[in-house]
Image (cartoon, rainbow, N blue to C red):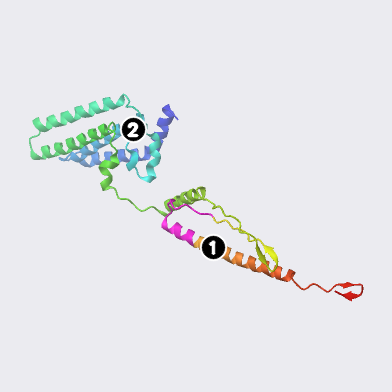
Amino acid sequence: VRGWRRFALALQAILYHELMLIACGVAIALLTWSGVNQVGLWTFTALWVLRQSAKINLFLGVPVTNDELMPHQVRFLKSFFARKSVSAFFPLSVTLATAALVIMIQRLVEVAATPFDIAGLTLVSTLFALGILEHWFMLLPLPAITLWGWGIKHAAPDSKELEIAADGAVAKAEAHATIPDLKPSPPTALDGKLFQPKAVAFSVVRSDSVVPQAQQQQMCARERLEDQFRQAFLEQHARTDMGTARRNIGMEPAAKINGRTS
């Protein structure tokens, strides 16, 4: 989808989350409205504004989205990202954010008189500068996983992911399965009759397919049962053929010609 339809779907995807953020901002404003310390409200407002700017730029289009760090539960939001050249909103947002940062630094140098004011403005201006730097990362071909991969906890895959991976591995193994060329054995003489052994083809699975350990154990157990069944079937089949051959090769009744036994 495109245009306003895409915008409406994107808004529906994040609507409740954004409403919760606005509610948190209103709560912080009510709690700190008559207080002396307004650093919490400044910090929340600065981060919220920069966050909205970054999300709008991702929606309109940037060269680098850095969506490798998104959790599995919210990866559907990648469908609303546009990886293309920057839109006209990017220079406007970066310019306004830089102007706000310059005003903060100016107030820090000229207006701030107490250590409390200096510490508060330094904190907010530093976070604001990092938010602007995050905007510029949307233009640099530098994967975010390279910067923050050291701090990511690689969680063990759940049972559903293991099941999906196992199904994919089994499908891959079946797609690459090969049947060896089995040449029929020459017929052998058994009690005067020719006995032709039947060839059985066994599928060979390539070893380059990656299968989880639990799934691999189940496959090995199943293969052992199949091998035992094949062996028992072949032995039973061979005994049956041999018994039939022995029953067929018996003493023929004596024939009489002109009243005399031959």
Name the element at disc 2.
helix
Q: Hey, which quadrant is residue 242 in on the image?
A: bottom right
Asked whether the beta carbons under mark 1 and mark 2 sit within 8 Å of each other, the answer is no
Q: Report the span colored magenta.
A: 203-220
Instruction: Work out which residue is located at the far top of the displayed protein and give it.
Output: 88
Q: Is residue 7 left or right of residue 116?
A: right
Name the residue tied to disc 1: 227
Query: What x and y, as percent, mark residue 16?
Result: 37, 40
Sequence order check, earlier mark of 1 and 2 = 2
Name the residue tied to disc 2: 58
* The magenta stretch spans residue 67: no
Please state which amino acid type lies under the numbered disc 1. Answer: Asp
Mark 2: give few (<14), some (14-19) or many (20+) Cα within 10 Å.
Answer: many
The one nearer the camera, 189 or 170, is 189
- Quadrant the C terminus occupies: bottom right
Q: Residue at x 17, y 37 (%)?
A: 126
Position above or below: 15 against 159: above
Q: Is residue 250 left or right of residue 72?
A: right
Q: Nearer the viewer, mark 1 or mark 2?
A: 1
Q: Residue at x 16, y 40 (%)?
A: 37
Q: How far apart are the alpha carbons under marks 1 and 2?
A: 56 Å
Count all numbered tags in the image, as a single digit: 2
Q: Is residue 182 left or right of residue 81?
A: right
Query: What x and y, as percent, mark residue 50?
Result: 26, 34
Position above or below: 4 against 262: above
Q: Hey, which quadrant is residue 74 in on the image?
A: top left
Mark 1: give few (<14), some (14-19) or many (20+) Cα within 10 Å.
Answer: few
Name the element at disc 1.
helix
